[in-house]
Amino acid sequence: MENQKLIGKEREMTFLEHLEELRWRLVKASAAILFFGIIAFIAKRIIFDIILFGPRTSDFLTYRGFCWMSDLLSMGDKLCMGDLAISVQNIDMSGQFSTHIMVSVVGGFILAFPFVLYQMWSFLKPGLKSKEIKNARGIVFFSSLLFFSGILFGYFIISPLSLQFLGSYRVSDEVVSSIKLNSYISTLVSITLSTGLVFQLPILIYFFTKIGLVTPEFLKKYRKHSLVGVLILAAVITPPDITSQILVSLPIMVLYEISIMISRRVLKKQAEEEAKE
């Protein structure tokens, strides 16, 4: 009887069974996003007044940090930043409601990211060898850590400085800046979410090295090409100002160098295991 159970567990799943498994994983992931999305929808005041509109005021944590640094360096108030001289307006009948829905979905995805990633990993895990599963131990934790680090970096560093530049830029004193609600929110959300996803680079390099697509030598050889690619990527995911692009590029290049070390470590470990065998 026990042998029959063992055989049943070890048998390969059919294509339709794989699709059914994937469907339930996606259902669970979607349910988690919906759950956290509802929480974000209910917490409207916190999400909008405190989080999203926080970078508009001079008492935002990042601005206070720069002001403290300015005082520490005896620079007076040169690094201090004031309130954004912009007004956010809605000109569409359903604009505020649709923006609320969009922000809730994005917030639900961010909060549910570890669970969503766990569901995807649980779907892929049965198809891997025990050795591969062992090598990927902690993948959900480290990937989530990098994602949330990117989210925090995008929100506290890139977004407020981008908003300060774009919000305070003037072609003439005669022009008053009245920003559309969806334009303001989209700028903030796209920068923050994109930075979180970009921070997954070390994880991608780890798996690409494991399957033989990249090596440390390859990454070193094309470092200059990668720099150009990083600048292009930074220009795509940030507003059109050089400060934001540099702020995005610097951590990506640091992550690139870390990825080279990860790739080298992976190959070294593989060589050691092959020597033992």
Image (tube, grey):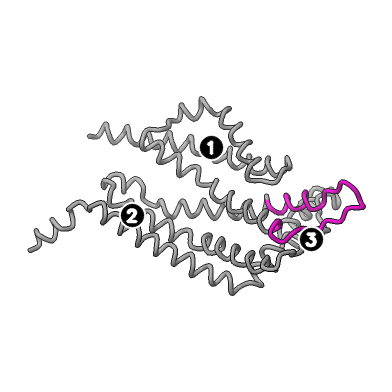
Report crowding for label 1: few under 14, some 14 to 19, many 20 or more residues within 10 A (C-alpha).
Answer: many
**Label 2 crowding class (10 Å Cα cut-off): few <14, some 14-19, many 20+?**
some
How far across and down, in percent of the image, does residue 146 sit? 51, 51
Q: Is residue 216 left or right of residue 5?
A: right
Residue range highlighted in magenta? 159-184
Residue 172 circle label: none
Q: Is mark 3 on a helix, strand or loop?
A: loop
Residue 156 part of the magenta-drawn span: no
Task: Name the amino acid, label 1.
Answer: Tyr
Q: Where is residue 89 in the image (x, y as percent from the top left)?
A: 76, 64
**Residue marked by disc 3:** 58
Residue sitting at x 45%, y 39%: 205
Residue situated in front as seen by the camera: 210 or 233:
233
Q: Which amino acid does label 3 sit on?
A: Ser
Image quadrant where one finds the N terminus: bottom left
> What is the distance, in whole Å, between disc 1 and disc 2 at their CAs?
28 Å
> Which residue is painted at 55% across and 29% down in the image?
223
Q: Residues within 10 Å of mark 3 (few under 14, many from 20)?
A: some
Task: Decide which of tag 3 and tag 1 comes sooner along the chain.
Answer: 3
Residue at numbered disc 2: 123
- Are dots 2 and 3 in contact, CB under 8 Å? no
Q: What residue type is labelled 2?
A: Phe
Residue occupying the point 60% across, 55% down: 152
- Numbered disc 1: secondary structure: helix
Label 2 or label 3, whichever lies nearer to me, is: 2
Seen from this angle, which residue lies furthest front? 93
Q: Mark 1 points at which residue?
A: 256
Q: Which residue is drawn at 72% across and 49% down?
A: 162
Residue 178 on the magenta segment: yes
Rendering coords of residue 234 (x, y %): 63, 41
